[in-house]
Structures are given as structure tokens and as C-alpha cells.
Amino acid sequence: MEKKGCPGFKTAGVSCGLKKNGQKDLGLIYSEVPANVAGLFTQNRVQAAPVLLDRQRITRGVCRALIVNSGIANCCTGEQGMRNAIQMAGFAAAGLGVAEDEVLVSSTGVIGDPLPVEKIQVATPALINALHGEGIHDLAEAIMTTDTVPKVVCRRGELDGVLFTVTGVAKGSGMICPDMATMLCFVMTDVQASPGLLKEMLKAAVDRSLNRITVDGDTSTNDTVLLMANGLSGAEVLNDAQRDVFQPVLDDVLIELAKWLIKDGEGATKLVEIVVTGAETDMDARRIADTVANSNLTKTALFGEDANWGRILAAVGRAGVAVAPEKTDIRFGPVLMVQNGMGCGKSAEVEVTKVLKQTEFDITIDLKSGKGHASVFTCDFSIDYVKINADYRS
Amino acid sequence: MEKKGCPGFKTAGVSCGLKKNGQKDLGLIYSEVPANVAGLFTQNRVQAAPVLLDRQRITRGVCRALIVNSGIANCCTGEQGMRNAIQMAGFAAAGLGVAEDEVLVSSTGVIGDPLPVEKIQVATPALINALHGEGIHDLAEAIMTTDTVPKVVCRRGELDGVLFTVTGVAKGSGMICPDMATMLCFVMTDVQASPGLLKEMLKAAVDRSLNRITVDGDTSTNDTVLLMANGLSGAEVLNDAQRDVFQPVLDDVLIELAKWLIKDGEGATKLVEIVVTGAETDMDARRIADTVANSNLTKTALFGEDANWGRILAAVGRAGVAVAPEKTDIRFGPVLMVQNGMGCGKSAEVEVTKVLKQTEFDITIDLKSGKGHASVFTCDFSIDYVKINADYRS
């Protein structure tokens, strides 16, 4: 666990009583100076009040703080929900002495329940009091729902001789699907960059990370990814050369967090990369990779460590893309299990079973029909997934 | 369990050693006279050898017999697989004294393993010997894979004063998804009808039944639905009036079998109809119904008997259809749980929980935006689904 946050950002996490078990459920990020900000939000047509609020506020391109709660999503809560989101921001703004519309808001948890804002109001002074340059771990805890571990990734780089930091926190861990999973992900950096460029870089990084993971095909109403840049390091990202230095560090933070979300996916025991090559187009490859990665029969077989490649080929066949099964190869790790659409026999299966016993491996599907390529991270589908989700609200 | 089959058809089921547990795994349907026949097959791009063979043979519009095995799907088995499917038909044809191309073939089970045709060859004489007018139960057993009960439905009707019979057998029970699930379904009737009309009526019936069910979103490589009509009752289906009598009986058989497939879905404990009304088009309604019916989070909540309507609304929102969440109502059985996108409170939830404890109920999603309508049957998603599918091949 990284203890360090990002220079110029203070963070905190406390318990305000939204979670029944008394664990931390209210978090805060505070930037000592106005930070440029960019955000990406859920594509779901049903969107929570804080998402709707942030979409408005982020158009300013600048913010000072983010207040976030877990336990209740403040979604499908109507006008009252929007009032509550605004109030929640107001508590933080008043305590921090910043303008209300410089505060962003996030929520995650059960959909449909009203947000007990009075609990948040009562706890906000203690939350602000707890702000600390090394409070990132508390923040990461405060945004957890069914996550089993807090997730913080911190990377450093050098721009024109100046050191900079990129620190991200994220939470999963069900409802994870490509194109913005149920996730909250907040990234802080001390470089200087315009809101427009931040958005471009965030979009590129998310396409390489959070948009390439899937746990269960369900996307959420509250997905939010924010990137805040306070400029305090003195490092600037203005031109292409500077971007070429910063982007890989940002990518690295988000890819690391994305993989972590999958590893901590509900009930997950394995992190599996589904790689599709030789498709006619990248889009075709992506559709096939997504279909395989979301196939319950494939995912339960991964849980059972069963080299049931027929289920993978059946998923390829129903992806809605023209494929030639009789040309298709499938590898588990380095082991060729299917050649030209047919199994390679028992000895290959013995080797594949060894691969399946690992906790991280890839499955490569080569269609041998073109240059299209895609990959997506998924996890296995375990008994615990069902247990967790059958009992989530009780 | 119906003991009776259909006049003029003899059926049988025996064990030939494909299933490890020694249960029945080889079945036969024999029509005493040439029967007109129509079929529908999987839309998966990966198709098993028997499906490819039947697609050719069924163009003749006439058949005498069907031989079917469970345990091995004879899929992804290349040219050898096609040779084996032809051989399998040949064994039955030789024993029955009919032309080889009058015999259709089906297989279901593990994908990728070669079919041990010699076991089928050895068992065919006993299979033919077991043919019986009341052998339908044995046939239904012989096609089971993870099904827990054999499924036979028999209905009778009257056409122009002549009694007729429609008898169907089917197997599921995983990989069940709209647009031809992994299922085998064989329907026999003693009416007289042309192959073209049989196909039309079969298509209509399947659209109202087997294409409206989903267990896990995975479709298979072997799906086959056949309708054989031997004309022995003397009842004829020629004109619209006669069709209006026959179609509902055929529909009834297929709807009953479809609901049974869901009730016996892998690990299923509940049969739930997802009804969508008030969509802009029927197509929109169908996309939403399918998305909800396949949502793992919705299905695990059903298993947990949890009135977690937020997951349903979230699934509605990601169906890729424009919806107005703030107008949407959701009912569990007769109980209004969500009105205009917001929960109706604890007392409604108490009533909904009573509905959820039932084994059969419907969930109605009213978008209040148009006249589009659709419904689909699904089941809950239980711990046993994962257990069954993690261990399937071991």
C-alpha cells in the first residue's frame, strides 16, 4: 500500500454511519490550490444525482474538492436526490471555505434509497479535520463497497527535469463492464495541464485500462473517473513531447488500478486477459473479446480450472461477427489447445490445466483472417459472486 | 409425465456408454411412414457436424427417423465429425431398413471431443429393438445433459372432426438464450401438412416460446428444433382455418416445454417473466427485456429474494435504448415498487418480498413512452449454476 498521496492534495476518510458495519464511508479530496479537472462518466441511461451534478460542474474545468460517500448510490432518488447531492457539496464547501460549485460529488452503493444527508452533515467537520497529505489510504477505504482491499496506485515521472506525481484511488468491484464499469476512480497529479488536454489524456488512458475490463457485464449508474491537476510541481504538459512523457505514467496508474479491480472482482480468483488477433477489424476483435470475457459458461469453467475450450469457441461463434471456426486457434498462455477449430488432444489439455491453475494468464484467440486485434481483462465466475450478490442488501 | 407418444411414431432411449454414469444417452425416433419435416437450427457461427448434416438433409422435406446422442456434442470435430454424424445416421438407417438420407442426427454434450461411433454402432440394434409407441419417456431421458427431469409435453386437438396429437420432447438446460438456446426439441404430430407450412408454423411457435427464454445468455453450437408430421390421423392442415386450429396446439406444446426448460435451468429456483411495456417499439422492448433477463446482478438478486429494483433499472439503462428513467414504473407481480423512476418505499418492499418468495412471478417494466411490448422468461442465478458449470466435464 502506497502511503503517499500527491503533493498539494490532502485526503481523508471517516465513518458517518451509512454503512451498517461502521466502516469508513465518507471521503474527501482537497486541493490546496484550484486544480484543473476532467471527468468521464457512465454511459448508462440511468444516472445518479451526483453524476448529473458533476457533469454540470466539471464544465468549469476547475475544482477545489471532491466529497464522496459509499453505502448509498443516491440514484433513482428524483429531485430530492439532486438537492441532497448539492447539499453534500455545500457541507464540504462551507467547511473548506471554497465556493460550492468548486466541489464535486460522488456516491456509490445501493440504488434507490434516499441519502441521509444529515449524517454527512454531522460528520463533515471531522472529515475536514482528518485531511492529511498521507490520508490516501483512508480515502480509498471510504469508497469501498464489496471491494475487499483499498486500491491506491502512485507513480512518479520527470518532465523537463522536474519530478511529478500521479496518484489514483479506485473502487470496484461488481457491475464491472467495458465502457465505464461501476467504479469510482479519482486521479490526482501535480503537473500543470489544461482541462481540455487533461480530458484527452484521461480518455486515452481509460480506453487502455478501465474500458478494457469486465466482471459481469453489468454497468452502473454512478461510474465516475476524475483527473485533477494542481500544477504545484511546476512540471507542465503543453506540447506533444511533454504529453509523451506524462501519458504513459497516467496509463500505468489506470492500468494498474483496472487490473486490481478485476483481481478484486466479486468472488474472483483469477485475472485473465482475453486476446483476440487475426480478426478482420479491431471492432470485430473487440466484440469477440467482450463476448468471451462476459460468457458465464467460459467464466465458470475458468473458476473450475476446466480446459473447456468448446465454450470459448461457442462464445466466439455467437459474438455476431463473421468468423471461420475451421481456421481458429486458441492458446491458453503459451499452450496451443485448439488448432484450425479442433482440439489438440489430451496432452495439450494436461498442459492447459497447468496454466489454468495460475492466478494470472491470458487466452489468445487467433482467427487468422485479418489484422484486427483487441484484448480485455476478465475474471472467473465463482460461487462467491452469487453469494455476494444474492445477499448484497441484507 | 405423459406416457403416450404420438400415433405412428415409435421412440426409444438406451445407454451406449457415452455418459460416464451409465445413464441413457442414445435416442431414436422412427416414423412408420415417411413424415414431412421442418427444422430450425442454431444461429451460432460455430455449428456442430449433426447440425450441418441436418441442414442439408432437411431440404428434402421428408424423413423417417432421427438418431440422437447426449454426452458428446460432435462439434469442433472437423471432417471426422461429419463422417461420424453420417455413420451414426447410417447405423440407424441400416437397422430400420430406410434410406440413409431419410435419417436426421442430433448430438448434445461436451464440445470438441471425438464421437466414439463404435459405441453407437454396438448399441443401435438394442436401440431399434426398444422402439415403442410409448417409449417417449426413454427418449426424453436419453437427450438429457444437466437437465434434472425428462421433459415431454403432449396435447390433442380436433380438426374438422378428426382428433390429432402433438407431442414434444426437449432438453436444456444451460446455454439457454433467446434465438435458439442450447436445446434439442423434437416435436411429432400425426396431422398432414406440407414441409413449407410446417416450417412456417414451427417458426411462429418458436418465436412465442423457445426464442423467449434465457438462462445465461450463452447460445450453443447444437441447437435443433424439429417438427415431424406423418399425416396418419387423417387430419389435414391446408388452409388458414385449419392452421388456426393447429397452431395454438403446437404453440402450447412449445411454450410448455420452454417454460419447463427455464424451470429446470441450471441451478434455477424461480421462473420469472420479464414484461416490458410502453417502449417506443417492440424491438426496443425486446432489447430491454433481454438485457434485464440476462443481467447477472438482477438474477442473483432474484435468487436472494432481494427487492433490489435498482439493479433492474440499471439494466434498463444499459440496454442501448433511449429511455426516460423518470417516467419508468416497475411492478413485481401486482405490486408497484417503482413509480416514475423512484422507489415506493418500505411498505411496497415488504409486499414485493412476498412476491419474490414465490417460484413463479412476473416483473413488469412500464416505460410509459409508447406502445412497444415484449416479454421473456428467465430464471434466477444461483450458487448451483456455478457449481454445475465449474464441474461440468469432471
Image (spheres, coloured by chain):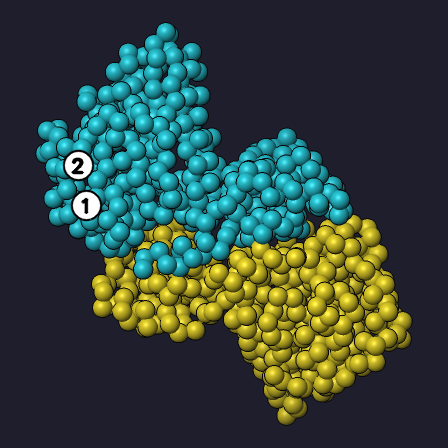
Chain colours: A yellow, B cyan
Q: Check the picture and name the quadrant holding the C terminus of chain B.
A: bottom left
Residue A63 sits in quarter:
bottom right
Mark 1 lies on a secondary structure that is: loop
Image disc number at residue B327 = none
Q: Label 1, label 2: how many angstroms apart (C-alpha)?
A: 9 Å
- Hey, which residue is sitting farthest top in the picture? B161
> What subunit carries mark 1?
B
- The type of residue carrying mark 1 is Cys
Mark number displayed over residue B127: 2
Q: Residues within 10 Å of mark 2 (few under 14, many from 20)?
A: many
| Chain of the residue on which disc 2 is drawn | B
- Same chain under badges 1 and 2? The reply is yes
Q: Which mark is residue B16?
A: 1
Identify whether B30 is placed above or below B289: above
Location of residue B373 in the rendering, given as x and y in whole percent from the top left corner: 59, 33
What is the x, y in percent for residue B192?
Answer: 29, 16
Q: Which residue is found at the position 31% from the left and 17% from the top?
A: B191
| Direction from residue B332 to residue B61 in the image, left or right | left
Q: Position of residue B182 (x, y in %)?
A: 37, 44
